[in-house]
Amino acid sequence: MGDNLSHASLILLVEGGGDASALNELFTFSSPSLAGALSTGVLAIESLSGSSNLTPRLDALRGQLCQYHVLVDDDVAGRQSVARARGEGLIAPHEENLIIVTGQRESELEDAYNPAVYKAAVLSNFGVDLDVKEFKNGKLKWSDRVEASFRSQGKNWDDRVKLAVKMAVGSQVSLNPGGALHPQRATSVVALMAELERRLAGIDT
């Protein structure tokens, strides 16, 4: 990874799919202290390109004596990745957050976003209307709801399309950070920001 990440006092590891750029803008808009830490390089956000890469990346950062924090989706892959990291002694409770949405068995970062910010971009770029019952099924995680919406409208859905949609959503969040968080579903993101503020306050920079 780049020297700017290695030299940061605290590195936030996220799964990918536009998460890093979106959270950078959200943090900058929402928190003066996080904005300052990001602008000076004290805080850096790094994409893992998948939660399966968490344990080797944490091992590498520990070898570099870097402090880190982890944000993963509250789904099978995310839970398994942090469980492996805990099992290897690479992560402590104060170093991890999951995206948890009350009432959902699984959830991911996009579940915390306000669809009003990105649904026009999904319609324009992919020809899929998210104002449908398949997307409004609140018990399923975001990717499953979007997949159901795509398929119900005769559109292909695979890992390539999923990544493209996530990148498009992340781009819209980056452009509209003020209205990006869902007022009822983003409590875990708000908690993450508070946790990062506390951790940064305790770091001698």
Image (cartoon, rainbow, N blue to C red):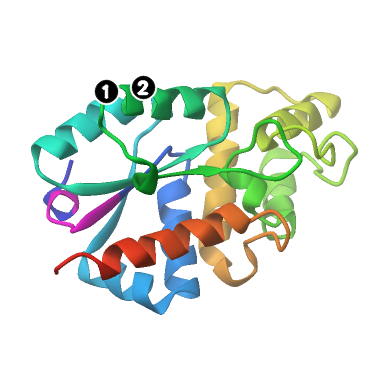
Q: Is residue 121 magenta?
A: no
Q: Is residue 153 above or below residue 130?
A: above
Residue under pointer 1: 88
Q: Secondary structure at mark 2?
A: helix
Q: How many circles with numbers are drawn on the protein?
A: 2
Q: Position of residue 117 (x, y in %)?
A: 68, 60
Instruction: Specify the quadrant of the image occupied by residue 183.
Output: bottom right
Type of amino acid under label 2:
Arg
Residue under pointer 2: 84
Cβ atoms at labels 2 and 1 below 8 Å apart: yes
**x 24%, y 34%: residue:** 58
Name the residue furthest left. 64
Per the rendered image, the range of residues in magenta is 5-11
**x 11%, y 50%: residue:** 3
Q: Secondary structure at mark 1?
A: loop
Q: Is residue 115 above or below residue 152?
A: below
Q: Nearer the viewer, residue 28 or 160?
A: 28
Q: Nearer the viewer, residue 171 or 83?
A: 83
